[in-house]
Amino acid sequence: MILARVVGNIVATQKNVRYENARVMLCQQITPEGEDTNYSCLALDAVDSGVGDTVLIVQEGWSASTASTGKAGAAIDSAIVGVVDHIDLLADEL
Amino acid sequence: MQLARVIGTVVATVKNESLGGRKLLVVQTLDRNLKESGKPMVAIDSVGAGVGELVFWCRGKEASFPFKREDTPTDCTIIGIVDSEAHVTNK
């Protein structure tokens, strides 16, 4: 899973049938310290996340499809499966 | 999934038979600011996309799921057309 920040969403009228009623969120990957990386991606929202939230994204088809549509076998390769409250790092404690 | 711009088409006469009738498009992946990111690649179309359109693709085995034949050999398929650049929220 990757850590990311939700930065927006997209609107697509013409899309795969399994994406009906789903929210496609635009996400920016971040480091555990909160810095942006150079990777951004789209993910289906499975947990009612919103812009600005730090989230967990699973990038594996079966899990993503099951989490966001309740059923496997959809053309979905990433889904937001958690909203992060906080991250504890060893470095912070030293 | 990632955003991409369709920048061309590919014609391949000799190909796997389950790819028959499928449209092969050259897509350039974009970052969240709609700037080019990485090298272009070839994707199969499943939604009727055309050159110049802003789309998003799905990678991996899941890329073959939109097709009736799940043995369709693809690892990248266009699965949606973004209505317009204004329909990409980025804060």
Image (cartoon, rainbow, N blue to C red):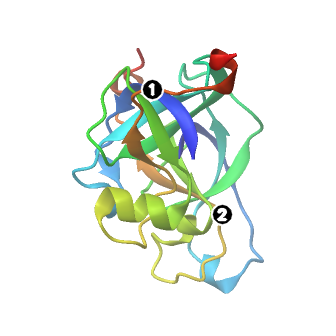
Q: Residues within 10 Å of mark 2 (few under 14, many from 20)?
A: some
Element carrying mark 2: loop
Q: In the image, is residue B34 above or below residue B83? A: above
Horizontal placement of B60 versus A10: left or right? Answer: right
Quarter of image, res A29: top right
Q: Chain of mark 2?
A: B
Which residue shows up at 25% across the image and 55% down it? A20
Q: Residue furthest front?
A: A94
Instruction: Measure the C-alpha gap from mark 1 to mark 2.
Output: 35 Å
Which residue shows up at 74% across the image and 41% down it? B40
The label on residue A76 is none
The quadrant the C terminus of chain B occupies is: top left
Horizontal placement of B51 versus A85: left or right? Answer: right
Which amino acid type corresponds to the residue marked 1 in the rendered image?
His
Element carrying mark 1: loop
Marks 1 and 2: which is nearer the front?
1
Which residue shows up at 74% across the image and 67% down it? B12
Is residue B84 among what the camera can see? Answer: no
Q: Name the one closer to the observer, B2 or B46.
A: B2
Q: Residue furthest left?
A: A21
Q: Name the one closer to the observer, B52 or A76.
A: A76
> Circle 1 sits on which residue?
A86
> Residue B24, percent across and down?
63, 59
Which amino acid type corresponds to the residue marked 2 in the rendered image?
Asp
Q: In the image, is residue A78 above or below residue A39? A: below
Check if mark 1's residue and mark 2's residue have beta carbons within 8 Å. Answer: no
Which residue shows up at 66% across the image and 37% down it? B28
> Circle 2 sits on which residue?
B75
> Residue A31, percent across and down?
64, 25
Q: Chain of mark 1?
A: A
Quarter of image, res B51: top right
Q: How many marks?
A: 2
